[in-house]
Amino acid sequence: MEFQVPENKPVISRRDQLQYPYLEKIHKWAEGVQYYTFGKSMNQELGIKIDKEWTLQYGNSDNPVEVFYTGELKFKNKFKEEVLNNINDIGIKQGLYSDSNIKSDYYTLYVIENNLKTTITQNAISRGMFRALSIIIHLTYHTMMC
């Protein structure tokens, strides 16, 4: 009986492409699945440290600041335009967090809504709005990576 398995996968996740080719589409879909803990804070309380050594190593991060920063670096203004819909501006800035536990050298998200003239930091956004914004950032990044 002939069979063919990928050479770069551990044995536990190998599959038989000759005997069960119909499973390939399902397997490829499953490899791209991302899990987001929408019922949790989605790291609203965290920023990221960006320094000279920071590189584009985004993988499975659930930190929207990291995903937003990486998206801007990879796709420039196009990424930001895709995320913006009912907000006038979005970005990350250093030292904007009002929580004293967050160091001033950390970067956090901010938004400016269309009808407001003030900057709203990620800790001042409601949990539901921050979760929705986080999902939009993640989905935009992954869609643009395809």
Image: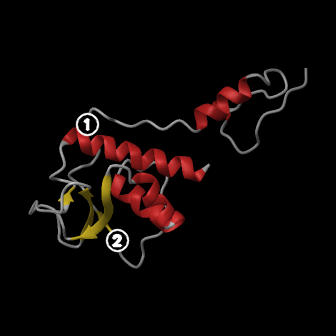
Let me know if residue 56 appears in the view.
no
Q: Earlier in the sequence, mark 2 or mark 1?
A: 1
Above or below residue 143? Residue 25 is above
Mark 2: which secondary structure?
loop
Dot 2, crowdedness within 10 Å: few (<14), some or many (≥20)?
Answer: some
User: Residue at coordinates 52% horizontally, 48% vertically from top-left?
Assistant: 142
Q: Circle 1 is placed at which residue position? A: 40
What residue is disc 2 on? Answer: 50
Q: With 3 as the anchor, is 88 left or right in this view?
A: left
Q: Secondary structure at mark 1?
A: loop
Relative vertical location of residue 134 with respect to residue 16 in this rendering, above or below: below
Q: Dot 1: within a 10 Å radius of its alpha carbon, few (fewer than 14), some, or many (20 or more) residues?
A: few
The three-letter code of the residue at mark 2 reads Ile
At x 31% / y 59%, what residue is drawn? 88
- Name the foreground residue: 14 vs 62: 62
Name the amino acid, label 1. Answer: Lys
Residue 15, percent from left and from top: 72, 28
Residue at screen point 24% across, 55% down: 46
Q: What percent of the width, then of the height, locates residue 19?
A: 83, 21
